[in-house]
């Protein structure tokens, strides 16, 4: 019996060491925020929902779509539209179980198609890309990723679509596999490629996310929340794709023409990646028509604007924001913000998640008309 107990203790110790080395550690990150340009009173609550928000997408007519964050293990509808002060399943609740598993990323393209990305339970199932024509409500594109593109441990969770609808860029944060990448999907040929895989620009650095609610550290520090490339955004002319890992000090960009050039060798593509600027530990990214890059600050409930001279300005900061997640531009210059409240969601019980509701989508004017091209 003593030998058996010693064996179990040894296995437990080795497991803890492996977890600590692979998933633990993390240093504090400096606060890059400054006094905000606009006050907390200008942060407007659009709506609240009893379950955590995943991401939000707003079209030109002001229709608002949002996902329920899959880390909260939702049991009901997972994609909804806010209509007349109520959340309505989109599409109908009867078909959602056949379409969605762990849908998270959502965006409306310039043709008014609503695109969603489902990571398939971190690649343990099948990751799936769907597009809905908002005029008709019909599914107009449906693609299931192969395991070599979305393997076990992957996390396909944010996406952007070029203006011509030809290419979809998807961020694989790869929180568990630790092999982050950007996926380039060709709509016409229905083919997907992983690029910049494990490159420094898409990888997490050794930083610990600290929020007023909690440090994002679990199991006594054996596991720390560290994610690779998460936020991605196209500029107004589809010339640059901006992107960043959550636990990363840099905001990066690469030319779209280089990403879509299938003959360009991997090393040459890596050499063409630019470190654009410093940034806070972040989640969502959005590029305005003015060229300013809006980046969320997950530690301080803030949104930062970075201009083309790489100057950082805190646009808004509020204690009401628990985790500044996805961003979407809507009509009238409104900037919409999904607050996923991840410190209350990740590795929490359903009772805890339910008790910390409701969860919010906010909006604000960023100080000038950010513009919708």
Image: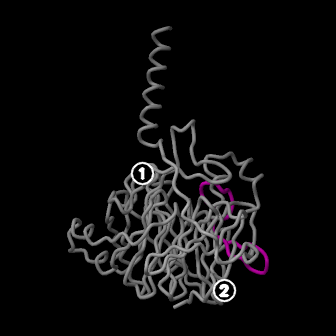
Residue 165 position in % (x across, y down): 43, 84
* Residue 276, above or below 71: below
Any part of residue 91 in sight: no
Q: Secondary structure at mark 2?
A: loop
User: First in sequence: mark 1 or mark 2?
Assistant: 2
**Crowd band around label 1 with a 10 angstrom C-alpha radius: few (<14), some (14–19), many (20+):** some
Q: Are marks 1 and 2 in contact (CB under 8 Å)?
A: no
Q: Nearer the viewer, mark 1 or mark 2?
A: 2
Estimate the spatial distance between the alpha carbons at disc 1 and disc 2, rounded to whole Å.
Answer: 37 Å
From the viewer's perspective, is 362 left or right of 25?
A: right
Display coloring? one colour
From the viewer's perspective, is 282 left or right of 168?
A: right
**Crowd band around label 2 with a 10 angstrom C-alpha radius: few (<14), some (14–19), many (20+):** few
Residue drawn 68% across and 76% down?
81
Q: Which residue is mark 1?
A: 152
Any part of residue 71 in sight: yes
Q: Is residue 71 magenta?
A: yes
Residue drawn 66% across and 86% down?
62
Q: Secondary structure at mark 1?
A: loop
Question: Which region shows up in magenta?
Answer: 68-89
Q: Of the numbered discs in the image, which one, if any, rests on residue 62?
A: 2
Residue 65: quarter of image: bottom right
Residue 302 position in % (x across, y down): 62, 67
């Amino acid at each position: 019996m003593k030998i058996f107990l010693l064996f179990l203790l040894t296995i437990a110790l080795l497991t803890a060491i492996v977890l600590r080395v692979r998933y633990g550690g993390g240093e504090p990150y400096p606060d890059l925020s400054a006094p905000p340009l606009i006050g907390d009173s200008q942060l407007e609550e659009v709506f609240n929902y009893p379950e955590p928000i995943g991401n939000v997408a707003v079209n030109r007519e002001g229709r608002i779509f949002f996902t329920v964050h899959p880390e909260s293990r939702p049991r009901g509808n997972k994609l909804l539209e806010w209509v007349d002060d109520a959340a309505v399943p989109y599409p109908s609740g009867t078909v959602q179980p056949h379409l969605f598993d762990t849908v998270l990323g959502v965006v409306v393209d310039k043709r008014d198609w609503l695109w969603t990305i489902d990571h398939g339970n971190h690649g343990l199932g099948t990751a799936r890309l769907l597009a809905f024509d908002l005029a008709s409500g019909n599914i107009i594109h449906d693609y299931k990723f192969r395991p070599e593109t979305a393997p076990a441990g992957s996390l396909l969770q944010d996406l952007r679509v070029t203006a011509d609808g030809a290419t979809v860029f998807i961020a694989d944060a790869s929180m568990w596999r630790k092999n982050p990448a950007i996926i380039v999907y060709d709509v016409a040929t229905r083919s997907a490629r992983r690029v910049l895989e494990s490159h420094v620009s898409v990888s997490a650095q050794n930083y610990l996310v600290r929020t007023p609610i909690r440090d994002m550290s679990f199991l006594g520090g054996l596991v720390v929340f560290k994610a690779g490339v998460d936020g991605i955004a196209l500029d107004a002319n589809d010339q640059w794709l901006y992107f960043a890992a959550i636990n990363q000090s840099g905001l990066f960009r690469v030319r779209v023409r280089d990403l879509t050039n299938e003959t360009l060798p991997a090393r040459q593509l890596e050499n063409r990646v630019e470190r654009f600027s410093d940034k806070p530990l972040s989640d969502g990214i959005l590029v305005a028509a003015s060229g300013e890059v809006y980046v969320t600050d997950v530690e301080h409930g803030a949104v930062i604007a970075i201009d083309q001279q790489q100057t950082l300005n805190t646009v808004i900061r509020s204690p009401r924001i628990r985790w500044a997640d996805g961003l979407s531009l809507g009509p009238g210059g409104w900037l919409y913000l999904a607050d996923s409240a991840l410190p209350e969601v990740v590795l929490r019980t359903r009772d805890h998640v339910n008790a910390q509701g409701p969860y919010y989508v906010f909006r604000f004017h960023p100080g000038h008309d950010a513009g919708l091209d």
